[in-house]
Amino acid sequence: MRLEVHSEARQEFLQAVSFYNAQVPGLGLRFIAEIERCQKALLETPLIGHPYGRRLRKFTVGDKFPYSIVYAVLGEVLFVRSRLAAPGLLADTVRPLTIGSSDRGSRLR
């Protein structure tokens, strides 16, 4: 199974990292670590999120951050979409979201 992230979901993620870093220095890095943990859990057990509409699922990111990952399992792809996107938006072009480990949080490839 592979993870793909819609561009709007990527923007939401980057905005959340910036928001948390502005609140407390380093909090954005902790948020990134929590998202990585959640992504790993979702890839290992894709159906652990709660049903969210007909084709989507929603996974809450722990107790520390009021953030949810909205996703769909499409064959061997776990597709993460924007929480603000139109309900039918699943077929847009998506790109994998990867966080560099050596410069954690400073860039997304």
Image (spheres, rainbow, N blue to C red):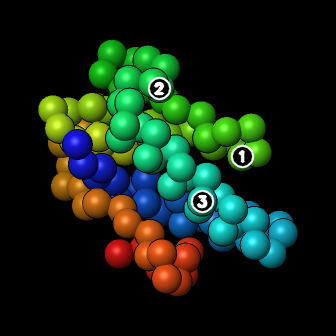
Q: Does residue 52 sit above or below 8 in this rendering?
A: above
Viewer-proximal residue, 90 or 71?
71
- Quadrant of the frame with the N terminus: top left
Q: Which mark is residue 22?
A: none
Q: Residue at x 67, y 39 (%)?
A: 62
Residue 33 — which label? 3
Circle 2 residue = 49
Quadrant of residue 81 within the rendered picture = top left
Give the residue furthest to the right. Answer: 24
Given this view, does label 2 or label 3 mark the residue nearer the observer? 3
Note whether residue 52 is visible: no
Pick the residue in front: 4 or 9. Answer: 4
Q: Which mark is residue 65?
A: 1
Q: CA distance from mark 1 to mark 3?
A: 12 Å
**Residue 27 position in % (x across, y down):** 75, 65
Quadrant of the image containing the C terminus: bottom left
Query: At label 1, which amino acid type do we have?
Result: Phe
Q: Secondary structure at mark 3?
A: helix
Q: Specify few, some or many for label 1: CA neighbours under 10 Å numbering under 14, 14-19, or 20 or more.
A: some
**Of label 1 and label 2, which has the lower sequence position?**
2
The residue positioned 43% from the left and 60% from the top of the image is 10
**Precedes in sequence: disc 2 or disc 3:** 3
Residue 25's x, y, as percent? 80, 75
Q: Are marks 1 and 3 in contact (CB under 8 Å)?
A: no
Q: Residue 91's image quarter?
A: top left
The residue under label 2 is which amino acid type?
Answer: Gly
Q: Mark 2: few, some, or many residues within 10 Å (few <14, many ≥20)? A: some
Image-based side of 104 in relation to 54, left or right: right
Q: Secondary structure at mark 2?
A: loop
Select label 1 or label 3 by which is in front: 3
